[in-house]
Amino acid sequence: MRLRRHTLQDALLADPRWPAFQAQLTAAGAAYNVSFSDVDVKNMTDWSVFDWRFHVWDKVMVAGYVPMLLNRSVFEPIARHFPAVRFSNFAHGR
């Protein structure tokens, strides 16, 4: 019996948060006439820097979602104990 190899894309598409992310990506990609269907995401390793999906993904996920998670998981707990703390999270510091 041969086991199916799962990819990062499979994990992303199975994540219950995916529909919300997909809606954000689709909204941000509308200006560039790009979509983020499940098939598009399954083939994201084929995207190049010339593909607008690459740039929209970067804007929404890397520049938006990741900093929000870092602030929520690192900055906010520290700030509860040290209210005057200053924090640098690349371009998303507080």
Image (cartoon, grey):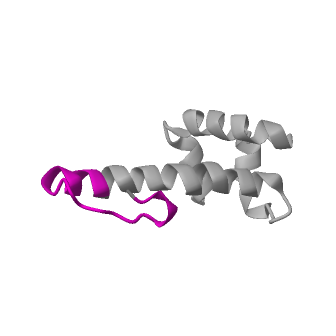
Which residue is the extreme one toward the front?
84
43 or 58: nearer the eye? 58
Which residue is the extreme one toward the left?
81
Identified at 21% across, 57% down, the residue is 84
Q: Which residues are magenta?
A: 75-93
Q: Is residue 74 above or below residue 31?
A: below
Q: Does residue 43 appear in this view?
A: no
Check the picture and name the quadrant holding the C terminus.
bottom left
Check the picture and name the quadrant holding the N terminus.
bottom right
Q: Does residue 61 appear in this view?
A: yes
7 or 29: nearer the eye? 29
Q: Is residue 26 above or below residue 85?
A: above
Where's residue 70, x and y in %?
39, 56
Where's residue 28, x and y in %?
71, 40
Where's residue 78, x and y in %?
21, 57
Judged left or right of residue 54, residue 1 is left
Which quadrant of the structure image shows residue 45?
Answer: bottom right
13 or 63: nearer the eye? 63
